Image (tube, rainbow, N blue to C red):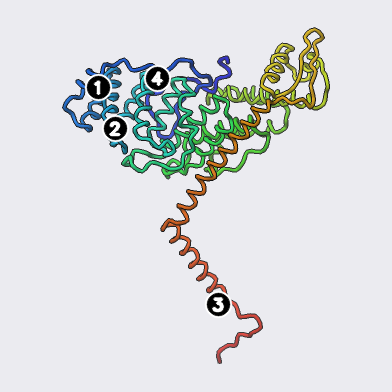
Amino acid sequence: MDEDDTIASTESTNQHPANSVVTNHVAEESTAATPMETSDSNKEEALTNGLDIKEKCQYVRNCGDNMEEVINTTRAIVNSVKTSPLPPPVIEAAHYMTSFLLQKQQPIKGISILEDLLAVRGADTVLSSLHADYVLLCLAAKMLSLPLRILDEDITAVADDEDGLLDVEHVLQYFYYGGVIYSALRKYHRALHFFEMCLSVPSQVPSTPISAIQVEAYQKFVLVWILTSNGSIPRLPINLNIPYVARPYLNLAQTAREDDSEKFASSLAQLTPLLEKHNNLGLAKQALECLRRKDITKLENTYISIKLETLAKYLTLPVLDIERRIFDMIITGEISAKICKKEGIVWFNKGSDVLDDDEAINSLTDCLQSCIATYGKLKNLNDEISLSRQFIGKVCESEERSKKEAAVASSSFPVKGKKVHETM
C-alpha cells in the first residue's frame, strides 16, 4: 500500500483536544510487536518507595521531561493496583502518561501498561476513559490489530466508577478512533457502526453545539458509506449543522450514486486539496477504486469475453492497471474470470461458484452467533429498563397526562346526540 492509500497522516499531537481530533490516523499496520518495558523492577520500587497511591500518582507529574522515569513510575503504580474499581489518581496518571508519550512520539511504550490496567479493571463491554487512551496509542503506533480484542466487543454500558473522569470527549474519541482503525483494516461495516455511535453522542456543551470530532467522524462516515453502498446517506440523530459543514462530502456521495466513475474521479480531483487537508484523500481514492471495480463487475454480467484494450478505453485507464485490478478481483473472489495474456482477452466464467462452501458456512455461522449474542444483550437491556423504577414512573406519568388531556378535550365538545342548553 503506497502513501496515497493511507487514510491519514501519522503526525503526533501534544495533547488531547476537547473538541478536535488528533491526526494520528494510519491505513497500514506496522509489523512491529509491542516491546517489553526495559525498566528494572527494583528501580520501579525505589522510585515510589514509602509513598501512598495518591503520592505515587502525583510523582508521575513531577518527573518533568524524563520519559523513562514517567514510564517506570506509571508501571510501578499499575503493578500496585490489583483490584477494580481503579482509584481515580491511577486513571489520572494513565491519562498523563498517554499525553506525555504522544508528545514525545513514543506511543508504543505505553501500550502494555494500559493493557495491564484494563485487564485489572476488566469488563471490556463497559466503556471507560482508559479505552480511548489505549485505542489512541495503538493507532498512533500503527498497531491496528492490537486493540481489536476490545473494539470487537460491543459497548453495553458506560463506567460510573471513575469519579467524573469519564466525559463526552472520551466517548467521542473511543468511537472515532475505533472507526478509523476499522477503516484502515477495510472492515467498513464495523467502521460505519463506530462512526454512527460517535455521531449519536449528544453534545453537553451548549456553547459549542458542533464537536470537531463529530464533524470529522461524519466526513469519514460519508466516504465509508460510498465504499459499502450506492444508496443515499441515511438520516442520523445528529446536529443539523454537521451535514452543512460536510457539504462537499455529501456532494461527492451524490456523484457516487450516479455510478459514473469518471465523473466521480473528476469531482475527486477538484476536492483533492480539501481532502488532503482533512487527511481523507486515501479513503476517497479507495471509494474511487470501489466504483471502478463495480464497473468491471457490471461487464461480467454483460459480456462473455472482452479485450483488455477495450476495457481500458471504457474505464480510461492503462491496460496494465486494468489487468492488475482484474487479477486482484479474481483473487478476492469479486469476479470469476480468466485472463489470456497472449490474446489480451478477459474471459468471464458466469455461474461458477467463487466461494468455498466451508468458508461460506463458517461465515454464516459467525453471523448467526453474533446476531444471537446481540439479541441476548438487547433482551437483557430491555428487561432492565422495563423493570426500572424511573422508567415505570415515566410511563405512569405519561398515561396520567394522556388521560387528563383526553378528559379536557372531551369536555370542550357536546356529547353526540345531545344539545347544549344555555342557562336562562
Circle 4 Cα neighbour tier, 10 Å, few/some/many (<14 / 14–19 / ≥20): many
Looking at the rendered structure, the secondary structure element under dot 2 is loop
Q: Which mark is residue 190?
A: none
- Give the mark nearer the N terminus: 2 vs 1: 1
Q: Which mark is residue 411?
A: 3
Circle 3 Cα neighbour tier, 10 Å, few/some/many (<14 / 14–19 / ≥20): few
- Give the mark nearer the N terminus: 4 vs 2: 2
Per the image, the residue denoted by label 1 is 63
Question: Amino acid type of disc 2?
Answer: Lys
Seen from the viewer's position, the closer of residues 202 and 349 is 349
Q: Which mark is residue 108?
A: 4
Question: Amino acid type of disc 1?
Answer: Cys
- Give the mark nearer the N terminus: 2 vs 3: 2
Mark 2 → mark 1, Cα distance in angstroms: 24 Å
88 vs 255, left or right, is: left
Mark 4 → mark 3, Cα distance in angstroms: 72 Å
- Location of residue 339 (image quadrant): top right
Mark 4 → mark 2, Cα distance in angstroms: 23 Å
Mark 1 → mark 4, Cα distance in angstroms: 19 Å
- Give the mark nearer the N terminus: 1 vs 3: 1
Could you tell me which residue is drawn at 16 percent across and 27 percent down?
A: 50
Looking at the rendered structure, the secondary structure element under dot 1 is loop
98 vs 2, left or right, is: left
Could you tell me which residue is drawn at 26 percent across and 24 percent down?
A: 76
- Residue at the bottom extreme, as displayed: 424
Question: Amino acid type of disc 4?
Answer: Ile
Per the image, the residue denoted by label 2 is 82
What is the quadrant of the C terminus in the image?
A: bottom right
